[in-house]
Amino acid sequence: MVRFSAKPWLSACLLVAVCGAAIYGLFRYRNSNPWNPERMAASLPVQDSIVLFLDLRALRQYGLLEVLAGSKAVEDDDYRKFIAESGFDYRTDLDRIALSLQGKSRHAVAVGRFDWGKIRNYAMHSGGTCKNAFCEVKSGNDFSENTLSFYPMHSSALAISSSPPGGAYGIGTPQQERNLKVVEAWPVGSAAIWIRVPGSSWKDPSAIPTGSRIFATALAPANDTFFSIVPAAGNRMALKLTAVCNNGSDSEKIRRDLEEATSLLKKLLDRERQSPGPADLATLLINGTFRTEGSTVHGEWPLEMELVRAIAGGGVR
């Protein structure tokens, strides 16, 4: 039998070639793999979390970005400070962002164009620390136990967390693969703005604007509730609701309760001789329509731009 003995240098070359191919493949994957809304949201903690998605490219086209710019609903102090000092303008450099809200913690995946060198310098100049590509900065918000942590997930994607130390480590795999099937089933379509509210969130009425608490109570039987803003006829916008329930009985109850809440609010306004303006939440609520489809409730309200501005500015009534 003929035996072949590879020279040591040939074995070394083969090893280098294999490693090089693997590194090149990983580099191509990390720098070409698209970040769609589902993958972004799945990278975040979603269990019992409020999850918000914004497509800033679409918002620029709709003319909504300037309305939402600086919104307290989108940014807290840490994010505003980060944006101001890290060398990019989210109005032009940020394409999409998904956020997860869990108690006092805020987690985000941001997709756009980032200068990692400037971002790292921001952390160091702010008294933070960077180990390899993971950086942490002491939080400047009211939650004294929080830190702002972040790292580059991809050449165009940044993981950011305002949470107890090390929070950004919880963004990405392996939870992404575990969450992906759940998130892909969410009925949000291609909306530029959507928010998922778990059923547990409706249990605390103090966190809900007074005028809409009766509507929130109606949604309590839902497992998950989704709101999205979509274009409507005549250059208008619409707020859409999809509430996912365990069964048709729950969905029918939600529909009836929403219709009763709408009717009650109309009667109350008539009795008080009030005529809410376009920036009032009541104007939105009294114009809702609802229907059921199996175990799902669908709702729609016409959305005035004045109300969007009021919500963005934290002045909704």
Image (tube, grey):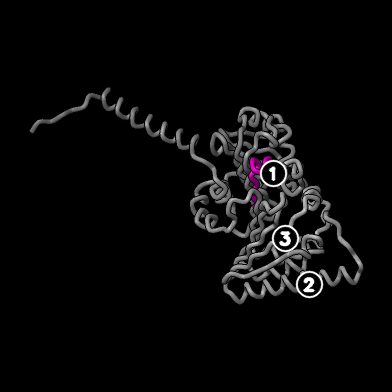
Task: Give coordinates of residue 187: x percent, y percent.
Answer: 58, 58
Earlier in the chain: of badge 3 and badge 2, it is 2
Q: Residues within 10 Å of mark 3 (few under 14, many from 20)?
A: some
Return the residue at label 2: 263
Residue 301: numbered disc: 3
Q: CA distance from mark 3 to mark 2?
A: 14 Å
Picture quadrant of residue 223: bottom right
Q: CA distance from mark 1 to mark 2?
A: 32 Å
Residue depicted at x 59% and y 53%: 45
Q: What residue range appears in magenta?
A: 52-61
Task: Give coordinates of residue 113: x percent, y percent.
Answer: 61, 33
Q: Secondary structure at mark 2?
A: helix
Callout 3–callout 2 Cβ contact below 8 Å: no
Q: With respect to residue 198, does 91 lie above or below?
A: above
Return the residue at label 1: 62
Residue 59 forms part of the magenta stretch: yes
Q: Secondary structure at mark 1?
A: helix
Q: How many numbered circles does the render carry?
A: 3
Image-based side of 186 in relation to 61, left or right: left
Q: Residue furthest right?
A: 273
Picture quadrant of residue 9: top left
- Residue 170 seen anywhere in this rendered image of the structure: no
Residue depicted at x 70% and y 57%: 239
Task: Give coordinates of residue 167: x percent, y percent.
Answer: 62, 46
**Circle 2: residue type:** Ser
